[in-house]
Amino acid sequence: MQVIVTDMKIAFIGTHGVGKTTLCFELAACLKRLDVSVDVVKEVARHCPLPINRDTTLDAQQWILHTQIAQEIATSQAYEAIVCDRAVLDNYAYLVHATGRKPEFEQLIRHWMSTYSMLVKVPVIAPPAFDGTRDISVDFQLEIDKVITELIADFQLETVELDAADRNNWIRVVLRNAGLPENTPQLDLFNNINNETL
């Protein structure tokens, strides 16, 4: 099955430790099964040379914000669809939490948020697990989620809200809202076998 997709950019947004990365790769796999050229823009904060999490600074968050935009621009040139592990709104939420609102950034944030085809808000369903980078404070996790929710409302952004009680159907919900088949064909490892050689 082939689906015609052009300039699709879906971002999973939300606080850390809620499963955004897993969802990104699940969705990318579904799109590949539909013969869509797709790549994942991974979370750039993990490569930041400056402090992150609760020790972050304005400089660190500026680096993360602008690197996110640069990665999205570069990836979108080579693929029909990109799936983003965070949007610039998430990056700005960590900045706001650390240093307060910055009106000089908000025009850029508002503009860049309009470049996403769909925003998917991932709810908190469990405490964050340590993975070598992620902050495991539950209070910090929930504080960031609250800031993101407030920014979504303030910027009047349309989001697909995933149901915390229905994790097993999250990808189906995303596919449905993107106008894509909910049951993507499974890979057939034997499609390319020539029966005459058997």
Image: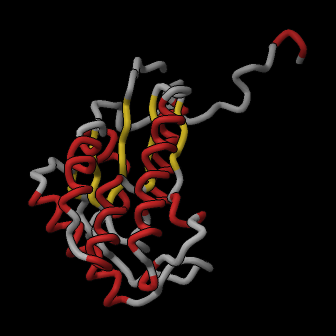
Residue 50 as seen in the image, left or right of residue 184:
right
Please tell me in which quadrant of the rendered image residue 153 appears: bottom left
Please tell me in which quadrant of the rendered image residue 139 appears: bottom left
Q: Residue furthest top?
A: 196
Q: Residue at x 53, y 35 (%)?
A: 74
Q: Residue at x 56, y 66 (%)?
A: 48
Percent position (x, y) of residue 100?
Answer: 23, 75
Percent position (x, y) of residue 107?
Answer: 20, 48
Percent position (x, y) of residue 182?
Answer: 35, 38
Residue 1 as seen in the image, left or right of residue 97:
right
- Residue closer to the observer: 108 or 9: 108
Q: Residue at x 43, y 66 (%)?
A: 19
Q: Is residue 170 visible?
A: no
Q: Residue at x 46, y 41 (%)?
A: 72
Residue 149 as seen in the image, left or right of residue 19:
left
145 lies above or below 69: below
- Residue closer to the observer: 48 or 15: 48
- Residue closer to the observer: 101 or 117: 101
